[in-house]
Amino acid sequence: MTFIQLFFIFIAAATLGAALLVVTTRNLIHAALWLIVSLFGVAVFYVILNAGFLAMVQVVIYIGAIAILMIFAIMLTRKVSKVPKPAFNSNWIWALLIAVVMFGSMTWILNMWPQFEAIPTAIAPSIDPLRLLGVALVSPEAYVLPFELASLLLLAALVGAIVVAWESR
Amino acid sequence: MFDPITEIGNWFEGVLANLGLSPGSVTIILAVLGVLIVVSFVLIIDIVLVWLERKVVARFQDRLGPNRVGPFGLIQPIADIVKLLIKEDTTPFGADRIIYNLAPILALATVLLIWSVIPFAPTLVGSEINVGILFIVAVGAIGTLAILMAGWASNNKYALLGAFRTVAQVISYEVPMLIALLVPVLLARTMSVQGIVKEQEIWYVFLAPVSALILFLTGIAEIGRTPFDLLEAESEIVAGFHIEYSGMKFGLFYAGELLHALTIGALFSTLFLGGWRGPFVEQVPILGVVYLFFKAFLVYFVIMWIRYSLPRIRIDHMLNLNWKFLTPLALVVLIATAVMDKILINASTRGYAIGMLIVNIVIILLTLVILHTYADTKRERVGELRPTANPDAAISSRDKTPDVSTLV
């Protein structure tokens, strides 16, 4: 077992453990902070896979924006951590079923993938993955249409947010 | 080529390899040592900053500053540290202990992390990563989290208010800061910090003065110094997010804040003032450290100058300045730079720089014209006659029917 495999198992365990704590912790702020640990673990996976750009974007967007906004929303909600509410509602059996089926099928599909046990190899220094990603996002042969559609969707969301927050005069 | 640090590193690597260690463990030992050296070096500079800050603020306020302990009060920071260490370590009632204790560590650690990608010299950089600029932004996001944690875990309404203000300010100012950071990335065609310094044959402050100014202003807002110190406004919320912290835990926040100001100085110098660039740096790379810190301290001094000269900005003005002025300006500069870059694609280095400078000057002039027109309309509105309560007018018009509008 190489160092990178041990490291991967350690990070995977930490990510999954933190994710488990997110759903079991009764204190909402603690749950949000555990979510941050879990999201950070995912960023570490990107680093292991030589995807530094995605790792940084993961931290900037998921921790820097989404998680902080979630904490902000929780803090603005009155006494949210003091009122005990049941952790399960009547739909828990269906949620469990779907989760088990999803996990099982994903494991099955990944197991059929020939490179399931492959170890990431170092990228040659002549290749700049960041530049390739940038070119791919704007070249017509690659992803320019999905990229522009995603931009349009974000713009629509932005306009929608302004409309919702607009003070009617 | 005289380069002692690389030579010492190579020599030590040889020593470790001769001891029979595997190459992997040699790399790990060298990395840990490198981290220790950079962190210690930066923290020692931090101690000097405590003295410098107190001495400079004293001169601005026509005082002497620390002058009792040691020559020119130089030992004062050591005395401060001893005092902070022996003070009682209090935890407020109802505080969330783990988060409360984690927050100051995280606050200082995030500032230290930024130094890992700032190149000290041509051959001396903590970690050469190709997404350095994005790394700095990501680390800054975790710093915001530390302040939010401190404010919430203290179980104090003023601390919580301070944390809310911080998040409102820092997240808003991150937007123009990110856009301004894109301009050097665009000019250098790389996100690596070392790459940006290497590309600066002409300092980027001449190619992109508007972006430099935006980065400087948003940098001051990110560290929450006057005029953007709403997060710890003494007259409103006592001390903000660190109100409940005592002893060395407060010391960590304080050290983090001072170091963050120098870090912004170093970042600004790296991106716009050529970083380690200076005379003879190609022959003697270690000189780069001197140049970098000279420039960083110069920017730090300007930040102090602004801090001790200006009053605090009001919260709605703070948000208006960001969303209605800095963000549109940053967007315009980014688009103009991108368009000019395509137009000047065949120009020489000098022609390219002059073209960029002219575009920036045009943008500055247009901005000034727009601001002037806006100020004029504002002034007219303020100068308009408004109906006020006037007893004389009420008495003289007693015979007539009382005019309600004059009494409003």
Image: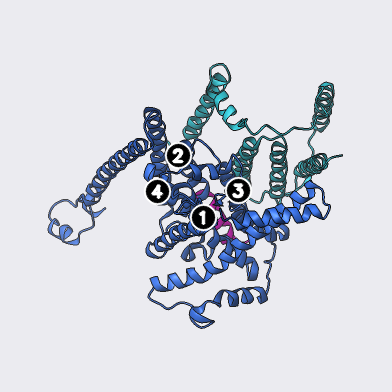
Which residue is located at x 63 percent, y 42 percent? A59
Residue matched to label 4: B213
Circles 2 and 4: CB atoms closer than 8 Å: no
* Residue corresponding to mark 2: B183
Question: Amino acid type of disc 3?
Answer: Val
Please report, as a chain letter, where disc 1 is located: B
Q: Which residue carries the number 3 mark?
A: B139
Marks 1 and 3 share the same chain = yes
**Residue bearing mark 1:** B288
Q: Which of marks 4 and 1 is in front?
A: 1
Residue B33 screen position, x and y as percent: 70, 57
Chain B drawn colour: blue
- Give the CA distance from mark 1 to mark 2: 24 Å
Say which element carries label 2: helix
Q: Which of marks 1 and 3 is in front?
A: 1
Q: Are marks 3 and 4 in contact (CB under 8 Å)?
A: no
